[in-house]
Amino acid sequence: MSEQETLGLAEEFAHYRRTVLAEVEVPGPAAVRRTARGRGRRRLATTTATVLALFGGATLGYAAMSGGPDREPGPVDPTPTISASSAPSGSASPAPSPSVTSGSPTATPPSGKISRAQLLDASVTLPAWRAGPGCPTSGIRLSGDDREGVNWLLAFDQGDVDGDGAVEAVGLVQCVLGSGGPMQVVAFDRDQQGRIVTLGRVVATSIDKPQWLFALDVVDDGTVRVQVGDIAPGGGWPGEWSQRQWRGYRFKGGSFAQVSGPTSFGPNPHDVNLVVTASNLVLADAPDGSRTGTITVRIRNGGHGPAAYVDLRIGLPAAVRPDGDGWAACRNDPEKTGQPVSCDLNKLGAGKEVRLTLGFRVAAGATVGTGKADVDARPMNASFDFVEEVYDPDNTVVITYR
Amino acid sequence: MLVTREVRVGGPPPDPGSPVPAPAELVFDDFYHAHFRSLVVQLTAYTGDRGQAQDLVQEAFCRAYANWARLARYDDPLAWVRRVAWNLGHNRWRRLRTAQAWLLRQRETHVAEPSPDRVALDTALAKLPPKQRRAVVLHYLADLTVAEIAAQERVAEGTVKSWLHRGRAALATHLRDTTEEVRDV
């Protein structure tokens, strides 16, 4: 390497440093403290989730969590107090409910905006969580932070969602179980006495999809927009991998129904799990003085989505060359690949498996001895870019050759 | 004592009169601001993913905060945080926790596309074996000496020299190839 190239490298890195420095977003030390505070509380839950994740990835981890031992139902707040903000009925009712004096309840919409603080301070009843371990829903208070087992108010917005001219509150609530838990978006209104009551559920996560709700936005026409995600983050699944969609919901005939946005998710490119097994290579003398042998490679897609292509690589010594018809399934010409020998395979759907019997030949006079080689399969997308999997130790097996 | 050489970014400029503040007086927030961004640059070069690099470095600082009483008395607390961040970067298992930290923050990130200026170097770095990549990035972006890299990676200095030599040569070749490809187009 020339001195000029050394200087060139230094300049490349200096330029790189300047460029990335300009892009960095700094969460700040306050975020560190928040995380540290949260960790003390959730250490046990995190450990459990991590262990689950190691054995099954996000989906199994989540399912296992749902099937875990029932938690003890009980009051969310250890010191239940009289709900101060649930305005008492009657003439002494404080400011939020001027409508209480009305003589015709049906004619006057309940008014009095519900602030986030008022919602957190009120006793509310949530639509029931789905079957399995959940959080209490009746006469509870939402929590401003994510303690285990509480109904955590993650996001909040306001708008006239039922078209009555008054402004309602809409909250994104998660029942905190470990690092996840079911989520739902719920609309709240005030009744004639000014008490905060539940108007209805907008959308909820499910065991299938969406498994996550990312954000909430009430628009001027009363549509509640919710950003839903196909797969829940956690257990090794980064949130960036989840596909997100904005879906709109309107309150019609006493309940919320979807009015805009997509209604289903396509397959998630990361929701693929290739599992490789392979037999050892035993070379035997052929009549022409060369040595030949075969291995059987089995690649199974244990994920829920397809791999558009599969890149198979076999790291045998360079003198061990592909041979025979077993390579016909490869889209490329494996004989032209070096070390490792690689073979691009076509789409492998969810639950599908491909078995290859691959022949090898060592030319007469060449020696390879004995050793170990990696057999490795990686999913690729339609553009032939590698797709990261949530669990990849099973993408590689080591075989012996002799 | 290991010398901290990272470029101080985002923090107060170093006082020319007093070269190194007494470790016992080190304040976490100052320490964080002085080093967060430069560590992200290094981990971005190593992982090729700035968003992930930010998460890794933030996680390293979370762990530093949990041990701050002890760490603040170290001669070189930065070496500790850097090693943790790098270990997180090349230990896949630990990534699980990063994902959970992500969950806790429940943030929405819209990571911008990387600037085309750095794509060439990112691409060239991605072609290096991880050990050579680590050595090269620590040398050029963390400004560490061979001895310091050896200490962080827990290997002999000769090993680091070999990584650096091979890594630099390969990088120069890859970059040359990229430049020629661009010219050919």
Image: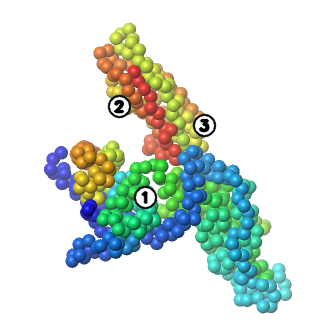
Q: Please say whether residue A382 is visible from this viewpoint.
A: no
Does dot 1 land on a helix, a strand or a loop? helix
Residue at 61% across / 61% down in the picture? A213
Neighbour class for label 1 at 10 Å: few (<14), some, many (≥20)? many
Identify residue type, mark 2. Gln
Compared to residue A203, the image places residue A187 above or below, namely below
Q: Quadrant of the C terminus of chain A?
A: top left
Q: Badges 2 and 3: C-beta atoms under 8 Å apart?
A: no
Residue A351: give its label.
Answer: 3
Q: Is residue A188 above or below residue B83?
A: below
Q: SS at mark 2?
A: loop
Decide: is A319 above or below B12.
Answer: above
**Are discs 1 and 2 located on one and the same chain?**
no
Q: CA distance from mark 1 to mark 2?
A: 33 Å
Callout 2 crowding tier (Cα within 10 Å): few <14, some 14–19, many ≥20:
some
Chain letter, disc 3 residue: A
Q: Amino acid at mark 1?
A: Leu
Q: Is residue A35 visible?
A: yes
Residue wearing tag 2: A339
